Image (cartoon, rainbow, N blue to C red):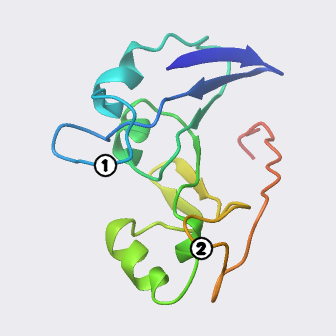
Amino acid sequence: NVNVETNGINLIGLEYMNADLSTDDAHRVNDLTIAEELPKIKTNPALPRVLIHHSPVGMEYAIKEKIPVMLTGHTHGGQFFPGQFLINARFPNYKGRYDFNGLTLLVSRGLGTFGPPIRIGTFSEMQFVTLTPDTGT
């Protein structure tokens, strides 16, 4: 739950936590929430901000804090059939790129697996993200 200034950006990392008090994820590592913790993290207002969180939840709080990029994973892209349908029910934004009110959300399928070491209907993925400044043009 810290910000690090690196290469001209604020890189904000959050522990694995629930989005807010109305959500519950059994995998969370604490009782904190994105809604409560994100506003507490001090950043350099002159630099752009990138948020990293384990799972694709809490986008509304990143938008509220005017964070333009959020990097996540957790879902493994569904990993195997019928996992894609089950994970999509829990995480509607479970793989790929999404744009929400000024926030770009990137959800990686990841390289590993959960449970059995197989993937059917999805693939392992390593994302390389190139950040470029918005010049307003």
| Residue at 56% from the left image edge and 83% from the top image edge | 80
Tell me the kind of residue under disc 1. Answer: Ala
| Residue at 16% from the left image edge and 45% from the top image edge | 22
Q: Give neighbour class at mark 1: few <14, some 14-19, many 20+ (Cα, 10 Å).
A: few
Pick the residue in front: 59 or 37: 37
| Residue 122, numbered circle | none
Rendered view: 102 above or below 133: below
Residue that mark 2 sits on? 116
Rendered view: 136 above or below 100: above
Give the x, y percent position of residue 54.
53, 44
Q: Earlier in the sequence, mark 1 or mark 2?
A: 1
Give the x, y percent position of residue 73.
58, 54
Give the x, y percent position of residue 125.
76, 66
SS under mark 2: loop
Q: Are marks 1 and 2 in contact (CB under 8 Å)?
A: no
Give the x, y percent position of residue 10.
66, 21
Task: Specify whether 19 is left or right of 4.
Answer: left
Pick the residue in front: 53 or 40: 53
Pick the residue in front: 135 or 122: 122
| Residue at 46% from the left image edge and 81% from the top image edge | 83
The answer for how far apart the CA atoms under marks 1 and 2 are is 20 Å
Q: Residue 51 sits in which quadrant?
A: top right
| Residue at 81% from the left image edge and 41% from the top image edge | 132
Task: Specify whether 13 is left or right of 136.
Answer: left
Tell me the kind of residue under disc 2. Answer: Pro
Residue that mark 1 sits on? 26
